[in-house]
Amino acid sequence: MTSPDTATLLEEAADRIADVSRADLQIMLRRAALLLRNSGSIAFEDDIEEALRDLSGEIGKTRNDTIRFIVREWMEKNTYLPVHLVDEDSEVDGIA
């Protein structure tokens, strides 16, 4: 027998809110908050995960920051987002 997931527990608690203890409600809400906080991750195939891990280490960013960087770069190159303009005081890699 499997235990119900957090969403099911929250739905059942909402149906019988007067019967749920404050401590049980606190536990369910904290568990839901943790799930929401950690739900931003995207699962990829093994080869992509490995490439992301390698690239993240190479550029010194977290996995999620690397994904954000890749998506932003792609969207800028394909004109879905405006390109960031570099001002005179910005540091560059020496590439003109």
Image (tube, rainbow, N blue to C red):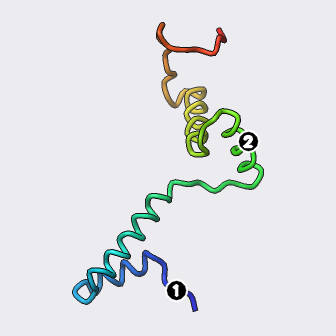
Among the 4 quarters of the image, the one containing residue 14: bottom left
Instruction: Name which residue lies at 54% across and 14% down.
Output: 91
Residue 32, x across and y down, in percent: 41, 69
Three-letter code, disc 1: Ser
Instruction: Name which residue lies at 33% across and 82% down.
Output: 24
Left or right of residue 7: residue 23: left
Q: CA distance from mark 2 to mark 1?
A: 37 Å
In the figure, 90 relative to 6: above or below?
above
Which quadrant does the C terminus fall into?
top right
Instruction: Name the residue furthest bottom.
Output: 1
Frontmost residue, 8 versus 94: 94
In the figure, 94 relative to 84: above or below?
above
Three-letter code, disc 2: Asp
Left or right of residue 60: residue 50: right
For disc 2, the marked residue is: 54
The answer to which of marks 2 and 1 sits earlier in the sequence is 1
In the figure, 48 relative to 33: above or below?
above
Instruction: Name which residue lies at 30% across and 80% down.
Output: 23
**How many residues crowd mark 2 within 10 Å: few (<14), some (14–19), many (20+)?**
few
In the figure, 33 relative to 58: above or below?
below
Residue 41, x across and y down, in percent: 56, 54
For disc 1, the marked residue is: 3
Q: Are marks 2 and 1 in contact (CB under 8 Å)?
A: no
> Helix or strand or loop: what does disc 2 sit on?
helix
Residue 59, x across and y down, in percent: 66, 33
> Helix or strand or loop: what does disc 1 sit on?
loop
Instruction: Name which residue lies at 75% across and 48% down.
Output: 50
Instruction: Name the residue furthest left.
Output: 18
**How many residues crowd mark 1 within 10 Å: few (<14), some (14–19), many (20+)?**
few
Left or right of residue 19: residue 12: right
Residue 21, x across and y down, in percent: 27, 85
